[in-house]
Image: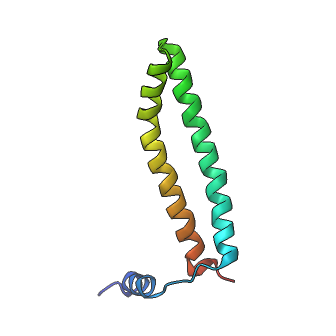
Amino acid sequence: MTDTKSSDIASNSSTETAVLTTSALFTAIAGIILVDAEILAVAGTAAYALSTAIGTGPLGLAVIGGLIGLPTLWLCWMVARLAIAGERDAANDL
C-alpha cells in the first residue's frame, strides 16, 4: 500500500505558487528587520566581548568580527528567505 498523503502534499506544494502581496511583503520585511536586528546585536556583542576578554586591540576585534560576521550574514539571509517563504505559503491565506 502506498502512502498517497505524502505524494499529494509534495505535488500540491510544487504546483501551487502563491503571489507575494504588498501586505505580505511588508509583514515579511517587518519580521526580517526584527529578527535580524537581534541576531546582529548578539553577534556584535559577542565579538566585542570575546575581543575584550582575549585582550586584542582593534585589529583583533576586526578579525573576530569577520569570523563571527560571515556566519551571521548567512543566518540573516536564511531568516529573510524563511520569512518570505512563510508569507507566500498558501496556508497563511485567509
**25 relative to 1 in the view: left or right:** right
Q: How is the image coloured?
A: rainbow
- Residue 86 x, y percent position in the rendering: 56, 69
Count of residue discs: 0
Residue occupying the far top of the picture: 55
Residue occupying the far front of the picture: 59
Nearer to me, 19 or 57: 57
- Height in image: 40 above or below 51? below
Q: Residue at x 59, y 36 (%)?
A: 42
Nearer to me, 44 or 16: 44
Q: Residue at x 43, y 88 (%)?
A: 15
Q: Quadrant of residue 29?
A: bottom right
Residue occupying the far left of the picture: 1
- Residue 37 x, y percent position in the rendering: 63, 46
- Residue 53 x, y percent position in the rendering: 52, 14
Q: Where, quadrant-wise, is the N terminus in this rendering?
A: bottom left
Q: Where, quadrant-wise, is the C terminus in this rendering?
A: bottom right
- Height in image: 2 above or below 81? below
Q: Residue at x 41, y 83 (%)?
A: 14
- Residue 57 x, y percent position in the rendering: 49, 15
Q: Residue at x 47, y 38 (%)?
A: 69
Q: Quadrant of residue 2?
A: bottom left
